[in-house]
Image (cartoon, coloured by chain):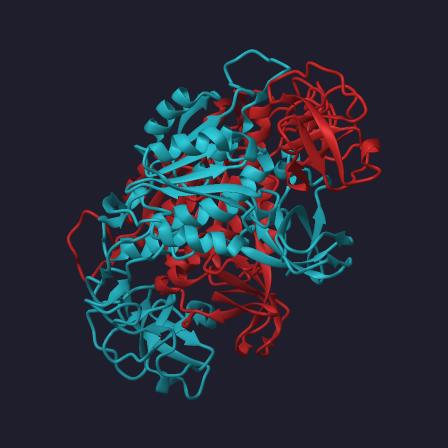
Chain colours: A red, B cyan
Amino acid sequence: MEKPLQATEAQHLILHSVIALGVETVQLDQSVGRVLAQEIHANRDLPPYDVSAMDGFALRSADLAGVPVVLEIIEDIKAGDLPGKILQTGQCARIMTGAPVPVGADAVIRVEETQEAGATAVRINKAVKPGNDIRLRGENMKDGDVVLTAGTEITPGVIGVLATVKAARFSVFRRPRVAILSTGNELEGMDEAVDLNKIPNANSYALMAQVQALGIEPVLLGIARDDPAELEQYLKRGLEYDVLLVSGGTSVGVHDYVRPTIEKLGVEMKFWRLAIRPGHPLAFGTTHKTAVFGLPGNPVSSMVCFEQFVIPALRQMMGNKRLYRRTVTARVAHDVKFRPGRTEFIRVQLTRDDNGYIASSTGTQSSGVLLSMARADGLMVIPSDSTGLAAGAQVVVQLLDGTVFQEAAGFFD
Amino acid sequence: MEKPLQATEAQHLILHSVIALGVETVQLDQSVGRVLAQEIHANRDLPPYDVSAMDGFALRSADLAGVPVVLEIIEDIKAGDLPGKILQTGQCARIMTGAPVPVGADAVIRVEETQEAGATAVRINKAVKPGNDIRLRGENMKDGDVVLTAGTEITPGVIGVLATVKAARFSVFRRPRVAILSTGNELEGMDEAVDLNKIPNANSYALMAQVQALGIEPVLLGIARDDPAELEQYLKRGLEYDVLLVSGGTSVGVHDYVRPTIEKLGVEMKFWRLAIRPGHPLAFGTTHKTAVFGLPGNPVSSMVCFEQFVIPALRQMMGNKRLYRRTVTARVAHDVKFRPGRTEFIRVQLTRDDNGYIASSTGTQSSGVLLSMARADGLMVIPSDSTGLAAGAQVVVQLLDGTVFQEAAGFFD
């Protein structure tokens, strides 16, 4: 038998084989989570002139040498107004956040540092330096500047910048079209009656959800039975997509007809035994237009393989630079034994104490127990050269879907 | 002036005022990210009988006392088959993953530990214990067991469990309907020509994207100008939604007409100065059906307030138990000075070395500079009792949208 591949070797082979997809135009309000395929330029100076950063009073800082002082209010300047007067010594203008600073003023003092002193005067209690609470023209962006580069992932902050330069439509990388095919006589479809001799088709739906969580709506092709002609028909349909996920059919026993059938259709296929647990059988291949992944039939193995190998490929196709799951460091709650030579992914729940995260196994790590995946916050990664961990040892945990939020705020004031 | 509120005080006041929404029925393929509003029960034992966990051979473990031994293969059992024979001493059955273990066998040995020994015999190279690589009936779930409780967030792993028990439709908490209203004469709409005396309406779109990132499609009501009658019309429309986000109109200067207008419409409104930076002016109120948030006009302040106060409220409405942003611990890359008495949220980028995350300021922390929000991975939280941090000090960082993935795999093998 060929030597099992290490996880990172397989990742690199896959990422070098996956073709980038084309681009398409989207509207601003449909673009969160996409990746920019073009530069975005500023369309004006921002602020367009020197403006107040606070609600308060525009004044001459030199007038505050002997605070407290009382200054005459010569006008009110709102955001959107232009100042009508030039400020002289002893004068100030009431000014709103974002409103232009009048000529003659060199600083703004916030309203909280002042007291009313009649209808047209204000008492200033604190000295400020020149430039205080003034935002200078072009400080945020200068007309023509590149404000966003191609390859930028469109987060809410980026949406704010796009709206600022009034980019209503722009170019992003296309999302892959993904098809999911299940294989095996033993599978029972969602619409079929319960048959104790069959197993429910959980894999297709777990894979569907993993794809959906990336912002891609996949197509479920159905279940191909253990018959070369039927499988060929399903595979042909699947090869019309950018990515085809085949669930099951990679284990040693069914190789005999899956491999020739898939290769007959022009897929250059590699079947790998991987030095990882769970998830060791993985198949990967490409045609001129389709990337094909053959995932293990065990539901947990399938989900773990998707996490490690399919997610980076799909994200690379969508133009993302961040291909891998966010990791955090944690201390392991209990001793862990395992045999070296393969990378292990142990399903864990995360809790926290004053020293950071603690990772606790969800219990049985059998690859048939999908409930343990449903309960997991992350996958604790045990490197292939490790022979065991004592409780308290530092480990790396990949965060799974559902961990963007946590139960406690995490800060106290 | 009233005493500024601490961030957690405001969070708690808001979370105690927000009403839970009702439930609705969804289909499995539309349910990722939702929260279950019902218990889910197992509909059979899984596995339905003792099955093999591996492709290999089912055998009697006692026969392996003197390995290597050669055993007679009496049948092939595939997943979905039922065994036809009872295993006797010296016999074995070729068995596939998930296939039922025949009567007489008490263990499975994986194919990798065996060698062919003619057409109907196999050489076994290694002894195994009773129960080896057998998954027992009901080990994964027992018929009637509660497998998922109400309040469970539907991740891909949960989808796999739902598909396993063939839950094609089920009850989830409804998502809030959210409206976004911008206020202010100074705002320039997306479809208006550039006017240097106006500022582009970035806030509405940044808020839209923040809401979308939670899986909610908000409605943008438009821009209400600084006119009580116009504002009243817009607010009336907004109060038809579950949540109304009003951008701008909370600063001291415009209080005078926003507050009476909004209270005239039956909203019990609280205007708070918050002991946080950026983002200090926040308004919050409720009617019998609508939660109203008045967010600061500064785009960064608006986004930070949304993160701290609106996200927990929206997630609580949707039935989530995890209301707050995921936090990680990091070391700060540089000295940080600030004045105690308020919680600061400093926009940071995260990098990593062998000792974990390092947080570096994105540069200017002016609340007008939205680009710094676009570049940030997280918000470094400085507690209100801190007077400064030296480089290397440990800090808490809230992860922003876009940080679910990272550039490096984070493990090496």
The residue lying at 72 percent from left, 52 percent from top is: B338
Judging depth in this view, the residue of A337 and B30 nearest the camera is B30
The quadrant of the picture occupied by the C terminus of chain A is: bottom right
The residue lying at 48 percent from left, 49 percent from top is: A283
Residue placed farthest to the front in the image? A118
Relative image position of residue A253 (x, y in whole percent): 38, 58
Q: In this view, does B398 lie to the left or right of A101?
A: left
Relative image position of residue B85 (x, y in whole percent): 20, 73
Relative image position of residue B243 (x, y in whole percent): 37, 38
Q: Is residue A87 left or right of residue B268?
A: right
Residue A32 sits above or below residue A357 on the image: above
Q: Quadrant of residue A96?
A: top right
Judging depth in this view, the residue of B350 and A231 nearest the camera is B350
Q: Can residue B11 be seen in this view?
A: yes
Judging depth in this view, the residue of A187 and A260 nearest the camera is A187
Relative image position of residue A37 (x, y in whole percent): 59, 26
Q: Is residue A72 left or right of residue B96?
A: right
Judging depth in this view, the residue of A315 and A273 nearest the camera is A315
Q: Can residue A247 be seen in this view?
A: no
